[in-house]
Image (cartoon, rainbow, N blue to C red):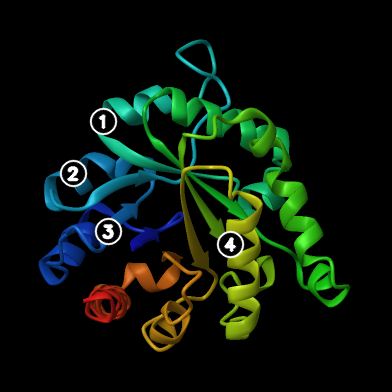
Amino acid sequence: MLIIGNWKMNGSAESLTTFFKTFQESSDAEVQIAVAPPYPYLPSLKAHGASIFMAAQDCSTHAGSGAFTGEVSAQMLADVGCTYVIVGHSERRQYFHETDQTVLTKTQNVLSAGMVPVICIGETLEQRKAGQTQDVLAHQLKLMIQHIAKEARVVIAYEPVWAIGTGLTPENAEIQEGCNFIARTLSDFSDVTVLYGGSVNGDNASEIFGNDAVQGALVGGASLKPHEFQRIIDSAKRRTNFDVNAVS
């Protein structure tokens, strides 16, 4: 299981210190934990949470270095110790007009820098109501299937756009349907992890993780609250313990 906290444009040096005074969890073989703070706080995260994987919320489409004021390259993120980079979040697609080609370019940069892309895909409410969910997901994955090596390690976060930051969560069957469809579509890839994201919290995490198709979560607002984030991770650990016991 993989749990990634996306702090978006939130936090401060003081709040990060306060967070880690309360949150003492660490990654293990069964549940990996990553946190994606705003760029300026990545070094502080490394200092406070040595056992937590560092993630970035985005990266530039430009590789290497150059005269691109305000941009941060994937190589720079690797240089400071990031393991994961979120690309294609619906907020980037909506507010910054990122296209599937933009997401592909960033994904390629992340992989070239030796990190793992966390590729966000998902449908709007209108598309869901029109029965277009699978068509939308397939379209958003099309370029990746065509241009990314099948042995590459990638994470796909299924995030229905209408469930992000709204408090609305799809029915369990809808989550399983979306995640299963992604897994089937990428069946030729050898190292794919499918996460669910969209108003994940301590109250609904156990039910969400009850889906075999869900291998973790991309958590937004709840990841800013240490006790709430802990509850989500505890739910993931119960799931992995259940899986181990069921096999044994």
Give the residue at mark 1: 80
Residue reaching furthest front? 248
Give the residue at mark 2: 46
Give the residue at mark 3: 33
Q: What amino acid is at disc 2? A: Lys
The earlier-in-sequence mark between 3 and 1 is 3
Q: Quadrant of residue 182?
A: bottom right
Task: Classify mark 2: helix, strand or loop.
Answer: helix
The disc placed on residue 158 is 4
In the depicted structure, whether residue 173 falls above or below residue 25: below
Q: Is residue 199 left or right of residue 51?
A: right
Task: Classify mark 4: helix, strand or loop.
Answer: strand
Q: What amino acid is at disc 1? A: Val
Residue closer to the observer: 205 or 98: 205
Identified at 47% across, 34% down, the residue is 151
Identified at 62% across, 48% down, the residue is 92
Classed neighbour count for the residue bearing mark 4: other residues with Cα under 10 Å, few (<14), some (14–19), many (≥20): many
Task: Classify mark 3: helix, strand or loop.
Answer: strand
The earlier-in-sequence mark between 3 and 2 is 3
Where does residue 19 sit, x and y in percent of width and height? Answer: 20, 66
The earlier-in-sequence mark between 4 and 1 is 1
